[in-house]
Amino acid sequence: MIKKNKNQICTRCVMDTTDPFIVFDENGNCNHCTAALKKVESVTFSSDNERENALNTIITKIKNSGEGNKYDCIIGLSGGVDSSYLAYVVKKLGLRPLAIHVDNGWNSELAVKNIENILKKLNIDLYTHVIDWEVFKSLQLAFLKASVIDLEMLSDNAIVIGIYNLSKKFKIKYFIDGTNYAAESIMPGSWFYVPKYDSLNIRSIYKRFGSGKKLTTYPLLNLVEYVRFRYFKKGESIALLNYVPYEKAKAMKILVEELEWKDYGGKHFESKITHFYQAYILPTKFNVDKRKAHLSSLICSGQLSRNDALNELKKELYNPSVFEDDKEYFIKKLGLTIEEFDKIMSAPVKEHHDYPAYQLVHKKLRNIFRKFFPKRVISE
């Protein structure tokens, strides 16, 4: 890799130096699309027959694990493209899923309707975890005041722990993951925080900036539970969309025609908070436009040309006709004044690791577990 310029864009995808850790090779290709192409290649089969054999092996394994149970797998359902299409695929393959949805108080009416249509038309049972709004509002305000980048960590943590608890309750081994390399092979580590279930980081930020409301109704892991979940969880996650032909445009067409699904106009915009966060807070305060990663992923999977992606990036991130109303809604829902919100937006950016976190001790724990449990795969 060679030294990068201050303002440089990849010659192959549309990632650029708004990711401070991006690097380029001598041809101007970035590390993100180089890695993404390897990921896509790793799940690209030499023939339809090879792909179908691999898929059938997985489906048989899941079905066998669920013998005698009402459900053989869990899926997350937000109403977005990936999770909705995954529900469609899972049922077409003859699996018996239990869907989980986390209601954090920010669902759009369209998302609720899409979820209702999917459940009804596919005959899927749903478990909804409703987060106490006053507690969740306090958590979000704390994260905003802390000036950390991953506001979505709070919803994602609830989803991850919800899936974990459901799998234990119903004795379900497999979680069918909606992530996929066709549309999600690129996302810089500087644009979010992992692990999403780092409860110490959430508690630390809340203790510093929260309202004092007790977090008894919000799912969190203590250190013992964190270690058990990260290193010893018995369930298995399978990214099933990597084993089926997945083109976003075709998937959306199927959803519209067969499930009466309606488009939100942006990735993850089924949630009002995610829409405002990705289209305004991230680019305005953190100089992050997640469209670059989403579009670059589609370039790497051959679903979009670089020129079309560049043209897409020229479009306004936020529709001016609805921005002011959305901003007013966001501020009012969180109980802020315009002055308080402007102060939050202008405050210096902080790292999640500026506050205590389980992730900070992960390296030490990882080395210990690798020593005593050498056969167990321990992620970085």
Image: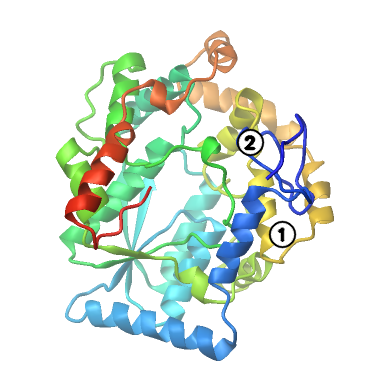
x then y, percent, for residue 287: 65, 29
Label 2 crowd bin: few (<14), some (14–19), many (20+), radius 10 Å: some
Lateral position of residue 14 relative to residue 186, left or right: right
Residue positioned 57% across, 47% down in the render: 187
Say which element carries label 2.
Answer: loop
Residue assigned mark 2: 19
Of helix, strand and loop, which one carries label 1?
helix
For badge 1, the amino acid type reads Ile
Q: Is residue 147 above or below residue 219?
A: above
Q: Is residue 104 visible?
A: no
Which quarter of the image is occupied by the N terminus? top right
Quarter residue 363 falls in: top left
Which disc, if any, is residue 105?
none
Q: Is residue 82 above or below residue 51?
A: above
Around disc 1, counting alpha carbons within 10 Å, would you say few (fewer than 14), some (14 to 19), or many (20 or more)?
many
Depth check: 19 or 328 in front?
A: 19
Q: Which mark is residue 299?
A: 1
Inspect the image, locate mark 2, and give the three-letter code of the amino acid beneath it: Asp
Compare residues 12 and 58 and report the one nearer the observer: 12
Q: How is the image coloured?
A: rainbow
Earlier-in-chain disc, 2 versus 1: 2
How far is disc 2 from disc 1 in space, using C-alphas?
18 Å
